[in-house]
């Protein structure tokens, strides 16, 4: 369990960075653009960014850093493209917005579980490094 705690701490740091990025995106988006659906839009943006990070790790060939800028550029384009599509459907299709809100509500339970697990892993890492 103690070795897995290091991976969970890295996951927690990744989650904090993602939260800060989405938070700053939310600050710069006018509230009247999405109204009450701003939280749904920002949740979909965080899913898009997470999907982009997964794609970067999946498509990154080992030992070939020369293709890294192309891969990151394509994934960033993919993230922006999905975000624009999400924004369009949230503004124009209330039924899809309701479906996305319900889906996000179901995932919140898993998110809370992993957050507790991540915090527990920090204590394991600290305890292991002290003793």
Image: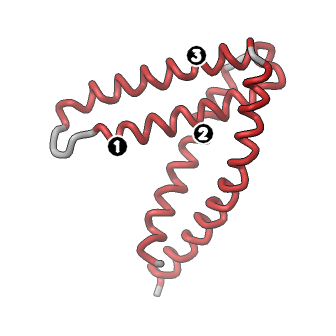
- Please give the label number shown on residue 57: 1
Considering only vertical position in the picture, is 66 above or below 85? below
Find numbered disc 3 in the image and state the secondary structure of the residue it sits on: helix
Residue 6: percent from left, percent from top: 44, 67
> Which residue: 58% across, 64% down?
118
Q: Which quarter of the picture shows residue 68?
A: top left
Q: On the image, numbered disc 3 is attached to which residue?
A: 84
Mark nearer the N terminus (2 vs 1) = 2
Q: On the image, numbered disc 2 is attached to which residue?
A: 20
Between the C-alphas of marks 2 and 1, the distance is 21 Å
> Which residue: 27% across, 24% down?
70
> Which residue: 49% across, 74% down?
125
Find numbered disc 2 in the image and state the secondary structure of the residue it sits on: helix
> Which residue: 62% across, 27% down?
25
Most extreme residue toward the right, as rendered? 36
User: Front-most of 80 and 120?
Assistant: 80
Q: Which quarter of the picture shows residue 59?
A: top left
Residue 60: percent from left, percent from top: 27, 39
Mark nearer the N terminus (1 vs 3) = 1
Residue 78: percent from left, percent from top: 44, 23
How packed is label 2: few (under 14 Cα within 10 Å), some, or many (20 or more)? few
- Relative placement, left or right, of 50 versus 98 is left
Mark nearer the N terminus (2 vs 3) = 2
User: Front-most of 87 and 23?
Assistant: 87
Between the C-alphas of marks 1 and 3, the distance is 23 Å
How packed is label 1: few (under 14 Cα within 10 Å), some, or many (20 or more)? few
Q: Check contact, mark 2 vs mark 1: CB within 8 A.
A: no
Q: Check contact, mark 2 vs mark 3: CB within 8 A.
A: no
Between the C-alphas of marks 2 and 3, the distance is 20 Å
- Closer mark to the observer between disc 2 and disc 3: 3
Find numbered disc 1 in the image and state the secondary structure of the residue it sits on: helix
């Amino acid at each position: 369990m103690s070795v897995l705690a290091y991976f969970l701490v890295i996951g927690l740091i990744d989650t904090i960075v993602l939260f800060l990025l989405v938070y700053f995106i939310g600050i710069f988006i006018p509230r009247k653009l999405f109204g009450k659906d701003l939280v749904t839009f920002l949740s979909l943006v965080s899913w898009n960014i997470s999907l982009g990070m997964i794609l970067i790790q999946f498509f990154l060939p080992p030992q070939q850093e020369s293709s890294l800028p192309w891969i990151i550029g394509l994934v960033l384009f993919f993230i922006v493209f999905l975000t624009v599509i999400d924004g369009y459907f949230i503004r124009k299709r209330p039924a899809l917005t309701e479906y996305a809100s319900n889906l996000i509500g179901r995932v919140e339970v898993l998110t809370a579980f992993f957050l507790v697990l991540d915090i527990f892993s920090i204590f394991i890492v600290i305890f292991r490094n002290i003793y």
